[in-house]
Amino acid sequence: MTFSAVRRTGLVLVTAAIWCQFWSHAQTLQHRPDQRPASATPPRPAAPASQELPEGTSLQVETSRHFPMRAGETIEARLLHPLFADGKLVVPENTMLRGTVMALEPDAKARWHARLRGDFTPFHTVEVHFDDLMLPTGPEKIEAATATGGALVVHLTTPGASPRQSFFAKEWAQAKDNLHSRIAYFTAPGKGDRALQFLYHQLPYHPERIEAHTAWSFELTSPLELPPQAFAVDPPVQPSTAAGRPEVWSVHAQLTRDLTSATARPGDSVQALVVEPVYDQDKELVVPQGATLVGKVTAANAARSFGRNGKLRFTFQQVRFPEGFNRPVEGALAGAATEKTQNLSLDAEGTISPKNQSSVLAPLLLTILAGRALDEDGNLTVNNGVASNGFGLVGRIVGLTASNRNLAAGLGYYAASLSLYENFLRSGRDVVFPRDTRIEIETTPLRAPVLSPAGR
């Protein structure tokens, strides 16, 4: 082999060795770490903001059972109406509140009414301070005004349109309604408790109690910050209406001042604060919470002598929005929460008046029974016992033990005279709506949602 051939062979070998070494290094290279930026951590959802009920928020509560009437007694009551803040439900109805009876105040009217019938119980009204709102997260302290003047409450609703009736037909219908009410007193659920209370009221003295369904209205004296709640409640939607008929919305509001048939005159201004937002069928806000309904008294008659009761009717013509502009509406009273003792009725036109419960049978029957004491036929003791209907159980015992016909007859005629006065001679009753009375208004809706002054 020549020198040149050897040189070429060595060059080839060196070149092959270099190539093999490079290839082996290429096969053992490590992959570089991925230089792409790591994905960003998803943000945590923001905690729900707490809600605040402003100072002056009105709360209406009602007891669900009887409680002893004594100072220091702890009572519980349920919220009659839901509470809204900024148009959102923050406390639903039926939420429980806990309070304490702070004091007992004399009830002069109830005392005199009872003493005329031989009941000398010193009747009282209670002052209650509610300080705990029972939320799902636990009791929440509230600062509120002392609640006074608790009373049994009934909810009035319009009966709908009724056909025209003659005077005698109306009187006959009223008599049947009174008869059904008296029968229901003895047949409706709870008759055992009512019978016991009836016997108690025949005694010259009996214990007092806070009746079930006694309601109070009071206001917050400072703002109440509520913890975030998990109430998933859809906006209340108005019920659908028949095709071709205008849509009607129900607006829940409360009166901003006292209103009574004794002093009201046609044309007097009436205002009510909207306490629940109103949404249309498309879930669009049309009347916000905090709006004011502005109306006027359209009819008012004060109570008069001989049992003639007062009457009251008012309507609303305008809604004043919190943004500061007004829109016309047509609204009439469709419901209200009133004291049971007023025994009010609401007709299809929105007129409120006390029910006429005058009965000619009661004084007539008592007069006939009183005359039995002067009847010389029959047993003297039995006749005196039947005639002695005045002053409750005390009068009955006196009539039975005195063995005096004139005394027994006098007690009976006293009871008949008292019944005659209450049924026909005394002045009638006025319609009284205290401030913060809860009312329901049926309004003809605005044609589009109104949320800002731009909709002027």
Image: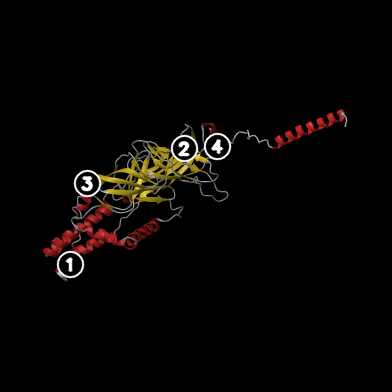
- Where disc 1 sits, the SS reads helix
Horizontal relation, residue 246 to residue 91: left or right? right
Q: How is the image coloured?
A: secondary structure
Please name the amino acid that badge 2 sits on: Val
Please name the amino acid that badge 4 sits on: Thr
Residue 56 image-quadrant placement: top left
The label on residue 383 is: 1
Q: Residue 428: in sight, yes or no?
A: no
Which residue matches tag 2? Answer: 319
Horizontal relation, residue 121 to residue 10: left or right? left
Separation of marks 3 and 4 at Cα, in angstroms: 72 Å
> Badge 3, how many Cα within 10 Å: few under 14, some, many 20+?
few
Which residue matches tag 3? Answer: 108
Sequence-wise, the earlier of marks 1 and 3 is: 3
Please name the amino acid that badge 3 sits on: Ala
> Badge 4, how many Cα within 10 Å: few under 14, some, many 20+?
few
Sequence-wise, the earlier of marks 2 and 4 is: 4
Circle 2/circle 1 CB separation < 8 Å: no
Separation of marks 2 and 4 at Cα, in angstroms: 49 Å
Estimate the x, y position of residue 66 in percent, counting from the top left.
29, 54
Q: Is 152 in front, or is 352?
A: 152
Please name the amino acid that badge 1 sits on: Asn
Sequence-wise, the earlier of marks 3 and 4 is: 4
Q: Nearer the viewer, mark 2 or mark 1?
A: 2
Which residue matches tag 4? Answer: 41
Separation of marks 1 and 3 at Cα, in angstroms: 35 Å
| In this view, 173 is above or below 92 | below
Sequence-wise, the earlier of marks 1 and 4 is: 4
Estimate the x, y position of residue 415 in percent, counting from the top left.
21, 58
Circle 1/circle 4 CB separation < 8 Å: no
